[in-house]
């Protein structure tokens, strides 16, 4: 099927603030982007989604396009390894991040050694999501229950973080960030590459999995942004290659949220003016270069940086490392998009070899990549595929030592 863009006439822009206020994400808040289930034309919505209503989103690209298996395998590997490396860099100390940024700007890429890169809870949640896809045997009606079970299992192995989360809930602290492996944006990126070629079902999987752990509709919109950007990245080096030049405009036209559309309008202007990711972060409300781990803003800044540097991951990482604060979410998303496009070979030097996934290994992840590469083109293959064994004891020890929160 063609990947021709569904062009629509540009909508009239309205005056925007110089800096957007942060979106207050709470499960009871209802932004202006909801449509009733009857208007979606989907008869396969889950019960929970039917009650909440589907989020308005127009697909600007065809999701049913089949790409070669070699390119598909490269994209899946890029999503899993790229997100893990981005998250690991975000977890480095500030001095190490500053050194790495300096080397990215001055040294040949093959000579840059970031040290040991230790992935955190977003990567664990990403691997849990892949396990849930296999356990569901490629059936969306089973995916949510398996994902819920796997997340509950993973979270029970994090006693320190569970206590911290309970205390935060009692204190009424912000719920705009991902905790305990439940980052819906990283999961949306992975589901996008796994569902590539699945037509309408792909966005349903993304929405249902997002609502499972974070039902806010702004977050669902952000998940759709990431999933659609990942589709564009996957088409790279195929007969259906799509330029990233119009990515922000296409996402703006597809979104049904006025608040997110306004932010995308501002980012489009910034991109046309060739402003850095640091400048874009200030538009999104970042103060004094200190980035807050906010789900919607993570998606917007990661996509903006990807649109600026789709083929030069070192430049995108260097720009994002100008910021301080919690960068694990935005770096995971940007690195994931960039490596979906370029493949793991687009990473500097031997970075994948420096990645620690204890108690698992890179070979363990590679086996999952091999098991998922033919789906959904050959669902009978994945239906016959079983999950690899987990290592709960090692996971528990790791979480106790690191206290992921």
Image (cartoon, rainbow, N blue to C red):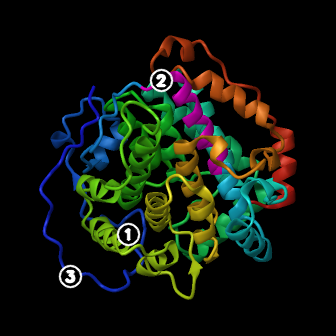
Residue denoted by label 2: 68
- Answer whether labels 2 and 3 touch (C-beta < 8 Å): no
Percent x, y for residue 347?
Answer: 67, 49
Among numbered discs 2 and 3, the one appearing first in the sequence: 3
Dots 1 and 3: beta carbons under 8 Å? no
193 versus 183 height, above or below:
above
Split into 4 quadrants, where in the image is the N terminus?
top left
- Residue 98: x, y in percent? 74, 75
Locate residue 137 relative to residue 162 in the image: left or right.
Answer: left
CA distance separating discs 1 and 3: 18 Å
Q: Which residue does the image show at 84% across and 51% down from the upper left? A: 398
Q: Which residue is mark 3?
A: 15
Answer with the quarter of the image where residue 246 lies: bottom left
Find the magenta span and give its range: 67-83
Other residues around mark 1 within 10 Å, as few (<14) / some (14–19) / many (≥20): many
Q: Residue at x 54, y 75 (%)?
A: 172
Find the distance from the CA under tag 2 to the CA under tag 1: 32 Å
């Amino acid at each position: 099927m063609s990947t021709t863009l569904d062009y629509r006439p540009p909508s009239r822009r309205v005056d925007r603030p110089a800096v957007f206020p942060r979106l207050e994400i709470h499960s009871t808040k209802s932004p202006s982007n909801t449509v009733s289930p009857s208007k979606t034309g989907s008869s396969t919505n889950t019960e929970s989604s039917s009650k909440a209503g589907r989020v308005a989103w127009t697909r600007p690209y065809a999701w049913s396009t089949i790409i070669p298996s070699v390119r598909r395998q490269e994209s899946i590997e890029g999503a899993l390894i790229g997100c893990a490396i981005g998250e690991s860099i975000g977890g480095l100390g500030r001095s190490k991040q500053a050194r790495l940024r300096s080397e990215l700007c001055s040294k040949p890429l093959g000579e840059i050694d970031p040290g040991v890169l230790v992935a955190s809870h977003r990567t664990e949640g990403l691997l849990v999501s892949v396990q849930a896809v296999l356990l569901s045997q490629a059936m969306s009606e089973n995916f949510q229950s398996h994902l819920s079970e796997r997340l509950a299992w993973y979270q029970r192995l994090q006693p320190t973080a569970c206590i911290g989360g309970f205390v935060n809930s009692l204190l009424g602290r912000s719920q705009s960030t991902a905790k305990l492996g439940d980052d819906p944006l990283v999961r949306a990126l992975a589901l996008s590459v796994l569902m590539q070629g699945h037509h309408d079902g792909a966005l349903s999987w993304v929405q249902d999995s997002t609502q499972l752990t974070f039902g806010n509709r702004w977050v669902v919109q952000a998940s759709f942004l990431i999933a659609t950007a990942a589709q564009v990245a996957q088409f790279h080096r195929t007969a259906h290659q799509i330029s990233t030049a119009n990515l922000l405009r296409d996402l703006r036209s597809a979104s049904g949220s006025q608040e997110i559309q306004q932010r995308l309008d501002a980012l489009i202007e910034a991109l046309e003016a060739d402003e850095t990711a640091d400048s874009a972060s200030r538009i999104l409300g970042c103060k004094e270069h200190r980035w807050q781990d906010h789900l919607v803003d993570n998606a917007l800044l990661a996509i903006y940086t990807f649109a600026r540097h789709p083929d030069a991951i070192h430049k995108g990482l260097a720009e994002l490392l100008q910021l301080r604060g919690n960068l694990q979410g935005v770096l995971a998303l940007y690195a994931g998009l960039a490596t979906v496009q370029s493949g793991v070979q687009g990473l500097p030097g031997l970075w994948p070899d420096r990645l620690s996934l204890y108690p698992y290994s890179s070979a363990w992840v590679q086996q999952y990549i091999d098991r998922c590469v033919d789906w959904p083109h050959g669902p009978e293959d994945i239906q016959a595929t079983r999950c690899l064994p987990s290592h709960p004891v090692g996971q528990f020890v790791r979480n106790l030592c690191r206290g992921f929160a």
